[in-house]
Image: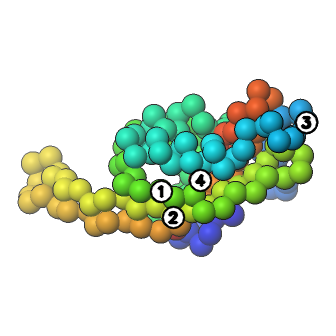
Amino acid sequence: MDVGVNTPNPVPFPEGFTRAPHKTRFTGDYDDTTPPLSTADEVLNSALKTSALRAYRSRLADGVRFHRQNQMPIVGVQPATKWLASQRSVSSADSKFSEVARSGDLGYTWGTYSIAPRTITARGRGEPQTLNVEAGFYVRVWVRERNGQWKVALDVLQ
């Protein structure tokens, strides 16, 4: 599920079916007392306004995938953490929808986001350059761990 994100090269995948890692899968009962996915999404969106790295760090599932326009997918917790450290904070993010499987261990959310412009200067090279406002939609696939916490398995901006 890449929601039409372009990549500079074809994205490689292993042959056959490869199961996503999920060592601490939620196997409890899903009922009205289980924390809702919509809340997890809203909390993440709020935290993204200060720091992408801090917002995601404790919310990354093993094998997490980030899909961004004109980039190869960022796959795995360590590469994602390194990449997130270089990302700008969002200026707004609004959850629009969430849905959870009957089993309670898988769900998805989508909404809108924007990232404000900022000015950067390449070290010792030329004039400052302003990065434009970026705005669009996001989709996230979440997995619930045994302890009931939701973790991001896939994050796509379009």
**Relative to residue 95, is residue 34 drawn left or right?**
right
Residue 96, position as x, y percentages in the image:
60, 63
Say which element carries label 4: strand
Type of amino acid under label 2? Thr
Residue at label 1?
93
| Residue plotted at (79% across, 37% down) | 34
User: Quarter-wise, where is residue 26 in the image?
Assistant: top right
Q: CA distance from mark 4 to mark 3?
A: 26 Å
Q: CA distance from mark 1 to mark 2?
A: 6 Å
Is label 4 or label 2 in front?
2
Dot 2 alpha-carbon crowd within 10 angstroms: few under 14, some 14 to 19, many 20 or more:
some
Residue at label 3?
29
Q: Earlier in the sequence, mark 1 or mark 3?
A: 3
**Relative to residue 97, is residue 78 drawn left or right?**
left
In front of the other: 35 or 122 = 35
| Residue plotted at (63% across, 45% down) | 39
Type of amino acid under label 1? Ala
Type of amino acid under label 4? Asp
Is label 4 or label 3 in front?
3
Say which element carries label 3: loop
Residue at label 2?
112
Q: CA distance from mark 1 to mark 4?
A: 13 Å
Q: Earlier in the sequence, mark 4 or mark 2?
A: 2
Q: Are marks 1 and 2 in contact (CB under 8 Å)?
A: yes
In front of the other: 55 or 119 = 55
Say which element carries label 1: strand
Residue at label 4?
155
Q: Earlier in the sequence, mark 3 or mark 2?
A: 3
Q: CA distance from mark 3 to mark 2?
A: 31 Å
Q: CA distance from mark 4 to mark 2?
A: 13 Å
| Residue plotted at (56% across, 48% down) | 42
